[in-house]
Image (tube, rainbow, N blue to C red):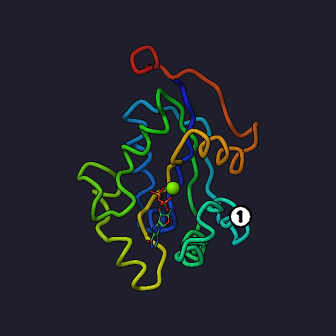
Amino acid sequence: MIERSLVIIKPDGVERSLVGEIIKRFENAGLKLVGMKMVWIGKKFAEEHYHAHSKKPFFKELVEFITEGPVVAFAIEGVHAVDNARRLVGDTSPHRAAPGTIRGDFAHLSMEYASKKGLGGKNLIHASGSKNEADEEIRLWFTKEELHSYSTVHEKHVF
Ligand code: IDP
Ligand code: MG
C-alpha cells in the first residue's frame, strides 16, 4: 500500500510562483518527497509523457503548453500515494475542482474553454492517474540514483 506517485508543477504553476505553496500541501499531508527536479522539457519528451493522449484533439496544444516553460517534477511516497495525490490536486477541469484542492483554489477555467481557445488546459499540476501510470512516469522522469530512501522525523505518526 506504500506507493510512489509523480507530480509535476506545470509551466503555469511555476510562472505564477506557486511552487512552494503546492509542495507544502503534499508535505502537510505527510507525503514524503523522494525525488525532485526543475526541467524545461522538449517536444519529444512531452509526447512520451503524454503518449496515452496522442489521439486526443487537444494533444498538440497540450504538448505546446507543457513545453512553454520549466516545470518542477517530484516523486512522493506514502500510503495510497497515487489516490492521495489526485485528491489534493482535484478535478482535471478547475471549474469542477473542489475548493481546498490545488486546482480548485488556484484556477477556475474549464477544459471546454481551453479547447475553444485552442489551448492546452492550464490546470497547474499533473499527478499520475494510476499505480501503473505512476511507475511508468517515475521511470521516465527519474533515474534510480535520483530517487531516495530515508526516514522523516514524523513518519511514526503518518505512515
Ligand atoms: P489529468 O491531468 O487530471 O490526469 P488528463 O485527462 O490525463 O487529466 O489530461 C491531461 C492534461 O491534458 C490535463 O491535465 C490538461 O492540462 C489537458 N487537457 C485535458 N482535457 C483537455 C481539453 O479538453 N482541452 C484542453 N486540454 C485538456
Ligand atoms: Mg492524466
Q: For the residue marked with disc 1, what is the amino acid?
A: Phe
Q: Cβ of disc 1 within 8 Å of ligand 1?
A: no
Q: Is residue 138 above or below residue 68?
A: above
Q: Is residue 23 above or below residue 13?
A: above
Q: Residue at x 53, y 54 (%)?
A: 8
- Does residue 151 appear to the left or right of 105 in the view shown? right
Q: Is residue 99 above or below residue 119?
A: above
Within-10-Å neighbours for mark 1: few <14, some 14–19, many 20+: some
The quarter in which the C terminus is drawn is top left
Give the x, y percent position of residue 19. 45, 55
- Does residue 90 appear to the left or right of 59 in the view shown? left
Give the x, y percent position of residue 76. 54, 37
- Residue 109 falls in image quadrant: bottom left
Check the image and name the residue furthest to the bottom.
Answer: 117
- Does residue 36 appear to the left or right of 21 in the view shown? right
Query: Which one is nearer the viewer's eye here, 83 or 52?
Result: 52
Look at mark 1 in the image and give the residue it sits on: 45
Q: Residue at x 52, y 24 (%)?
A: 1
Give the x, y percent position of residue 115. 43, 79
